[in-house]
């Protein structure tokens, strides 16, 4: 097995720099997301009526999202974390496309590879559209027969991707085929291990798992971001490649963009930017004053340098659930 650095070197990694602020990037990412959602909708309808996938369209809507992620991933991270009322399958596919691209950016993959990663993220689970809803939405533990049916979504996704109107790049096919493989060989369908698993599939495994455990699913409650990160860090070397888990944690941080937080000053705000090197002190848009009343003008503060009124250092007291104090991150986003 090649060491990770050598493996990456073959991809000619790029050092990305932020080219816009989250607040500038939000509108652009939002419209890219909406376009992808519309395209995903028509993709599902096409599949439902027995037609083939139309890849050209998918490429067109993915590129603007990838451009936004390369400029500043914060806005898309916020979008990926909005657990909106969309059906889980929808949101999950787009969120996984975003997470794959964000991890790819963090390790320096060139833009055209980020587009492939996003496309793969969108297509990982399309096979589930052919699996009975009663099995996918079952609250109790699945029987062995039912679980083997769910595992079939990998083959179904591959077949649907293979039948598409134009040839899907091999890297994307590999990603669909192997995103349930695990680093220690405990995954399926082939029990591959380590770097036998293609790089894109190793990335997709992390994206898929993170989004699943932090989302409301029929059979499980979502877990908060900080706990999800802690668990996944513990699973490194078993389920996931350690270097990729590190890259994922670096890219999303402890308080990802869009996290509602209560400050030690009593004010409430939303995280708009991480401070590299000072992960516990991000930049925050303050929305409520210390009496939890909405401010006329939101103010941006940088916790790395900000000192409160009585010269006290202001820090994050705790993270809040979406909807706390009547604040909806989705409405705030837009």
Image: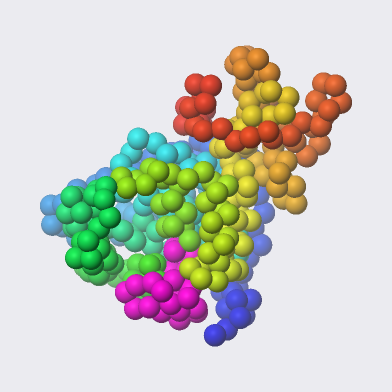
The residue that appears at 31% across and 58% down in the rendered structure is 125
Foreground residue among 197 and 118: 197
Residue occupying the point 34% across, 61% down: 124
**Residue 48 vertical position relative to residue 29 in the rendered view, above or below:** below
Q: Residue at x 41, y 79 (%)?
A: 192
User: How many marks can you see?
Assistant: 0
Residue numbers of the magenta segment: 182-205
> In this view of the protein, can residue 19 be seen by the observer?
no
Image location of residue 62, percent across then percent down: 41, 53
Whole-percent x and y of residue 200?
46, 69
Q: Residue furthest bottom?
A: 1
Residue 204 in sight in this render: yes
At 78% from the left edge and 39% from the top edge, which residue is drawn? 304
Q: How is the image coloured?
A: rainbow
Residue 262 drawn above or below residue 75: above
| 183 is within the stretch colored magenta | yes
Residue 332 x %, y %: 52, 28
For this view, does 68 lie left or right of residue 56?
A: right
**Residue at the left extreme of this rendering:** 49
The quadrant of the image that shows the N terminus is bottom right
Vertical placement of 298 versus 14: above or below? Answer: above
Q: Quadrant of residue 15?
A: bottom right
Image location (x, y in percent) of residue 215: 41, 45
Q: Quadrant of residue 157?
A: bottom left
Q: 225 or 140, which is in the foreground?
A: 140
Query: Residue 167 lies in magenta, yes or no?
Result: no
From the viewer's perspective, tell me whether residue 75 is left or right of residue 309: left
Relative height, residue 243 to residue 2 (above, below): above
Looking at the image, which is closer to me, 305 or 137?
137
């Amino acid at each position: 097995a090649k060491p990770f650095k050598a493996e990456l070197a073959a991809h000619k990694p790029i050092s990305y720099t932020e080219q816009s602020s989250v607040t500038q990037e939000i509108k652009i990412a939002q419209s890219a997301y909406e376009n992808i959602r519309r395209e995903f909708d028509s993709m599902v309808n096409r599949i439902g009526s027995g037609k083939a996938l139309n890849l050209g369209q998918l490429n067109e809507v993915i590129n603007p999202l990838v451009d936004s992620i390369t400029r500043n991933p914060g806005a898309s991270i916020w979008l990926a974390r909005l657990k909106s009322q969309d059906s889980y399958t929808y949101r999950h596919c787009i969120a996984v496309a975003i997470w794959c691209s964000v991890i790819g950016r963090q390790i320096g993959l060139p833009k055209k590879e980020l587009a492939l990663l996003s496309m793969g993220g969108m297509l990982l689970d399309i096979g589930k559209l052919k699996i009975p809803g009663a099995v996918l939405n079952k609250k109790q533990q699945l029987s062995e027969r039912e679980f083997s049916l769910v595992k079939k979504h990998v083959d179904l996704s591959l077949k649907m991707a293979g039948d598409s109107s134009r040839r899907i790049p091999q890297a994307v096919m590999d990603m669909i085929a192997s995103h349930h493989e695990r680093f220690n060989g405990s995954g399926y369908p082939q029990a591959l291990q380590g770097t036998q698993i293609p790089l894109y599939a190793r990335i997709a495994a992390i994206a898929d798992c993170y989004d699943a455990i932090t989302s409301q699913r029929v059979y499980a409650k979502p877990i908060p971001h900080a706990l999800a990160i802690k668990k996944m860090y513990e699973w490194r070397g078993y389920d996931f490649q350690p270097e990729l888990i590190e890259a994922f944690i670096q890219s999303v941080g402890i308080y990802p963009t869009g996290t509602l937080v209560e400050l030690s000053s009593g004010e409430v705000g939303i995280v708009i930017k991480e401070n590299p090197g000072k992960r516990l002190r991000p930049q925050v848009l303050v929305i409520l004053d210390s009496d939890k009343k909405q401010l006329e003008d939101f103010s941006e503060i940088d916790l790395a340098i900000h000192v409160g009124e009585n010269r006290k250092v202001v820090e994050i007291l705790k993270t809040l659930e979406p909807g706390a104090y009547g604040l909806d991150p989705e409405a705030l986003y837009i």
